[in-house]
Amino acid sequence: MSTSSVSTTTVANGLPAPQVQPNSPPGAPKEADGKLESLLQRINSLTAQYQTEPGQPAAGGRPLGPATAVTAPKPVVAAAQESPDAAGSFVPREPSTFAEAGITESAVEELTLKYLLARGEDTGHGVADQIKLPYLMLEPLLRQMKQDQLVVYRGTTTVGDYVYQLTDMGRERARRHSAKCTYFGSAPVELDEYIQSVGAQSLQHQRPSEPALREAFRDLLINPRMLDRLGPAINSGRGMFLFGSPGNGKTSIAERVTRCFGQFIWIPRAIGVDGEIVRLYDPSHHELAMNSKSEGLLTTEKYDRRWVRVRRPTIVVGGELTMDNLELTLNTATGVSEAPIQLKSNCGTLVIDDFGRQRMSTDELLNRWIVPLEKRYDFLNLPSGKKIQVPFDQLIIFSTNLEPKDLVDDAFLRRIPYKIEVTDPSEDEFRELFRMMCPLLGFEYSAESVDYLIETYYRNTTRPFRCCHPRDLLLQVRNYCSYKRQPVQLTPSAMDFAVENYFAAV
């Protein structure tokens, strides 16, 4: 008796699907047909996320051709849909193979051995959590390490997992790896992936509007003319000079500029370049902002845990800035390089505060950055001597009390297209600052006391108004009242005490 013959046809997603030929013999069991139909439905259901029209983007953001297999190429960054942050935000997709992760098995084995050497023992899931790769990727490697007698089973935990411990051979190999580099944290992300992520999250793609600026500066008193000057400079995404007398809020303005852009970005914990580890995520500069229960996207989508979501960074450096902060810094004890500040501030704002007062000369700083400011990329030297190209994609703000033309030459000023002077507040603005600060510091506003202050200590002495004076004088009064155990109250006599202390050397 003849049997049913099976051929293959290509379905929409490019996968071959079994089809029963019409010459199936009469009387063939209907039960077999039903099982086959059920199997086909199951296959289609599992691969539905890859079904798309030829030439249209698939789930990973890469177009599939008419005969493209569903084993998609390496997922770098996938565009997020219905993002809770802003339209067009990006989320790194979880890899399913070492090739997709851009890392070799030997590199993962090295991280695993060094971690177990430091830890002593851990489960397979614990190792996966440490190096931030899926356990299903790591489990076959752990089995291979067991066969190679690098690890042994110390015990069992959940179904399919074990407690792993190094053998003598494993400890010896781990020590050799640690002698070169002690790093055993998150598996590094390829440099190319990081470059693509910066391009996807760049400030160049965003054009903040006037309402966005007003929202960002809502806690500052900014006159409309200043806001109109700041708006185009922020929209340019390139750079600006903020200059003027001290105490008028240049640093405060610079620190709030980032609020005009999208709230969050994704950055890798570490970048790998030809075996070198560059640590990028820095808790002292990056504010972690991982998903919450209310953010449906991140709780339903599996993201690459080698990346972290942080608030768009605002990094402020002042007189402590040196040339070493602008280059990769190798920690000789650990063998790990630290990223420079311009790399950590990518997709955010970098504020050079008190520009002109750094320990290095302004010429050194400007010569180092004159090309990156023009080309929007920078070159860094690895400890091995190799030079790499990295993005230089941030809004740089130079804040100074000095005249820009006295600090830099015309060639550099041309590359900083916006020079904005932060002027002294008017008398009306000065009074408004008192009205704003009084309730914040626990005072009831007293027009009589403010009139006395302005007449006695500003008009009669031709002292200029400064934006910082209302806050600083009110703090003097509050501290005095606290010391005397008196109610916090704004009076002319309290103003006399505050001015005597605050302006004693001015």
Image (tube, rainbow, N blue to C red):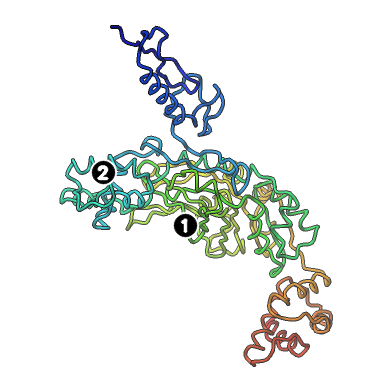
Residue located beneath label 2 in the image: 142
Q: From the viewer's side, name the closer residue of 88 and 484.
A: 88
Q: Is residue 322 above or below residue 483?
A: above
Q: Secondary structure at mark 1?
A: loop
Disc number at residue 282?
Answer: 1
- In the rendered image, which quarter is residue 10 located in? top left
Residue 332 placement (x, y as % from top left): 34, 56
Q: Secondary structure at mark 2?
A: helix
Q: From the viewer's side, name the closer residue of 213 and 241.
A: 213
Q: From the viewer's side, name the closer residue of 281 and 442.
A: 442
Tag 1: amino acid: Asp
Left or right, 179 with respect to 477, comes to left
Q: Residues within 10 Å of mark 2 (few under 14, many from 20)?
A: many
Residue 376 placement (x, y as % from top left): 58, 43
Tag 2: amino acid: Leu
Residue at the outermost front position: 27
